[in-house]
Amino acid sequence: MGNISPETRERRGVRNTHNIISIIFLSLVALLALTFSVVLLIRNATLQRQEDAIRSELDALNAEGYYTTAETEKLVEEAQQQGAQEEAVNIRKSIQEKLENGDGTTSAIRSLFPDQMVVASSGRYYFFPILDTIEKHGFGPDDFEINDKGFMEYKGSDSNFKFRNGIDVSRFQGEIDWEKVKDSGIEFAFIRAGLRGTTEGKLLVDDYFEYNIKNATENGIEVGVYFYSQAINEEEAKEEVQMVLDLIEPYTVTFPVVIDIESADSDSARTNDMTSDQYELVAKTFCDTVKQAGYTPMIYGNVKSYTLLLDAADVDDYGTWIAYYGTPLYYPYHFDIWQYSSNGQVDGIDGNVDLNICITDY
């Protein structure tokens, strides 16, 4: 029993060695596992600290009014919807106020399109962009106002600005006392020389032309003349202008010689089917002939005349006499004379008369 053979001792030594190696290996594995666990714990703690820091930063940003992309897009969409609703309410309110003030539908619509000229004709509305290629008149909405005599006055900041008050007359004013007209402050007058019939096209001299031009000039009132045109071609335009030139030849005419371009309010008017090119040919033929005769040519018309009938850019070489009743003037381009009222009252004239303000020195 006490004697152990060498083989047995050897086997026991080998087994003991294996056990020690196993213990050491297991210890190393346990140590590695512990180390890895410690590393994971440290990493998790670091990630948690980073997450907490990021969350804290986001909370701070949100507290300062910052939002995520999704939140921002939602806020923008809500703001756009709210803005559109508020704008619609403001537009309706603006239109309502204008209609209640008696401005009329056209005036209300015009206020919504400040970059365009809005023209109503035959139950329709037409929109014309305001061109930068045509010189603007540059007056502000408060530069002109009606004084206690019913005449237009310039109230702008230009102390050197000069203007004159005048009238335009025809047979409808009857016999005028031109001395009283002069004393009332009228400085110039446009006398109607004649007209062409709207249906048959007959040329007519105004019944009071000679009386008016003679008595106006004798009382120191400067005069111009105008002709109500219904010419439909170049030949008829030449007939009209020659008639005018023959009529004014004996008199001193210092103000322009004018062609009146308006659409006739009649289903049977001979000009109903004319194009803007045809209107422009008539106007240019008249004005060019007037200029060749040594007078100053001018076109009279309203906003419709200078948009639907004529292209303002195509007749920009001639003087402009614009008809628009009320202030401020609803015409953006330069002008020489503004007919601002059709129901003026002037001493020496029975009934209403057209009133004008001239801003060009003739």
Image (cartoon, helix red, strand yellow):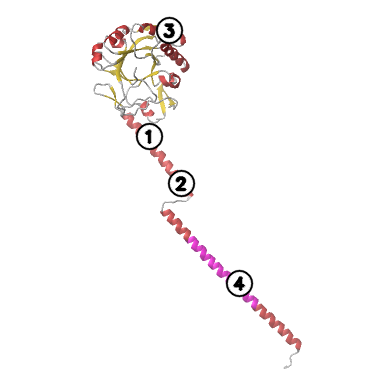
Q: Which mark sits nearer the N-terminus, 3 or 2? A: 2
State which mark lies toward you, 1 or 4: 4
Dot 3: few (<14), some (14–19), or many (≥20) neighbours within 10 Å?
Answer: few
Q: Is residue 196 magenta?
A: no
Indicate the amino acid at tag 4. Leu
User: Can residue 10 be seen by looking at this rendering?
Assistant: yes
Q: Which mark sits nearer the N-terminus, 1 or 4? A: 4
Q: Position of residue 209 (x, y in %)?
A: 32, 8
Label disc, if present, on residue 298 of the rendered structure: none
In terms of secondary structure, what is the magenta stretch mainly? helix
Q: CA distance from mark 3 to mark 1?
A: 51 Å
Tag 2 residue: 74
Indicate the amino acid at tag 3. Glu
Q: Which mark sits nearer the N-terminus, 3 or 4? A: 4
Label disc, if present, on residue 32 of the rendered structure: 4
Indicate the amino acid at tag 1. Ile
Q: Which of 120/176 is in front?
A: 176
- At 50% across and 63% down in the image, what residue appears? 48
- At 51% across and 64% down in the image, what residue appears? 46
Dot 1: few (<14), some (14–19), or many (≥20) neighbours within 10 Å?
Answer: some
Q: Which residues are magenta?
A: 24-52
Tag 3 residue: 239
- Circle 1/circle 2 CB separation < 8 Å: no
Which of the 4 image quadrants contains residue 86? Answer: top left
State which mark lies toward you, 3 or 1: 3
Q: Residue furthest front?
A: 160
| SS at badge 1 | helix
Q: CA distance from mark 3 to mark 4?
A: 117 Å
Q: Which mark sits nearer the N-terminus, 1 or 2? A: 2
Q: CA distance from mark 4 to mark 2?
A: 52 Å
- At 37% across and 34% down in the image, what residue appears? 91
Indicate the amino acid at tag 2. Lys
